[in-house]
Image (tube, helix red, strand yellow):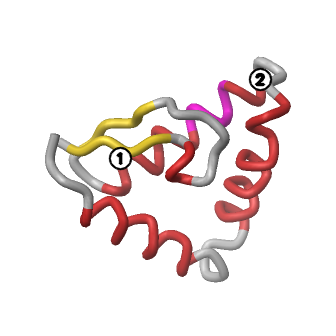
Amino acid sequence: MKTITCRQLGGPCDLQHRGETGDEVIQAQDKHLKEMEAAGDAAHQPARDDMKARWLHPKRSLGWYRDTKRAFDELPED
């Protein structure tokens, strides 16, 4: 299990996401950003917009995805 923050994933806060894989924490970040958007949190909106754009253009966003998974893999175990 590893921990990465919203900020480390491009967001504005230090909420911690824990997971076994990079995919798990990317999905947790997506959920978190959706929840913050629904709550009207303007600070999270740029990160949410970026995430929406990545889901719409996965081939173009493959670099971000690979970099994020690599960064997660390099984190120490909790």
Q: Is residue 63 above or below residue 13?
A: below
Badge 2 amino acid: Ala
Image mark for residue 38? 2
12 or 25, nearer to the observer: 12
Crowding at mark 2 (Cα within 10 Å: few <14, some 14-19, many 20+)? few
Give the image location of residue 13, x and y in percent.
60, 34
**Residue 67, x across and y down, in percent:** 45, 74
Which of disc 1 and disc 2 is earlier in sequence?
1
CA–CA distance in space, label 2 to label 1: 21 Å
Q: Is residue 64 magenta?
A: no
Q: Which mark is residue 11?
A: none
Indicate whether 33 appears above or below 57: above
Image position, residue 37 (x, y; %): 77, 30
Q: Give the residue displayed 79% in from the left and 51% down from the top.
A: 49
On-image quarter of the C terminus: top left
Which quadrant is home to the N terminus? top left
- Determine whether, in the image, residue 11 is placed left or right of residue 38: left
Residue in view at x 14 percent, y 48 percent: 77
Kind of element beneath mark 1 = helix
Left or right, 50 with reference to 30: right
x 66%, y 40%: residue: 12
The amino acid pointed to by label 1 is Glu
Categorize mark 1 by other alpha carbons within 10 Å: few (<14), some (14-19), many (20+): some
Task: Tell me if label 2 and label 1 are in contact, CB under 8 Å.
Answer: no
Residue shown at 77% from the left, 18% from the top: 39
Q: Nearer the viewer, residue 77 or 19?
A: 77
Dominant secondary structure of the residues highlighted in magenta in the image: helix
**Which dot marks residue 24?**
1
Magenta highlight range:
31-35
In this rendering, the answer to whether 35 lies above or below 31 is: above
Left or right: 6 in relation to 18: right
Q: Quadrant of residue 31?
A: top right
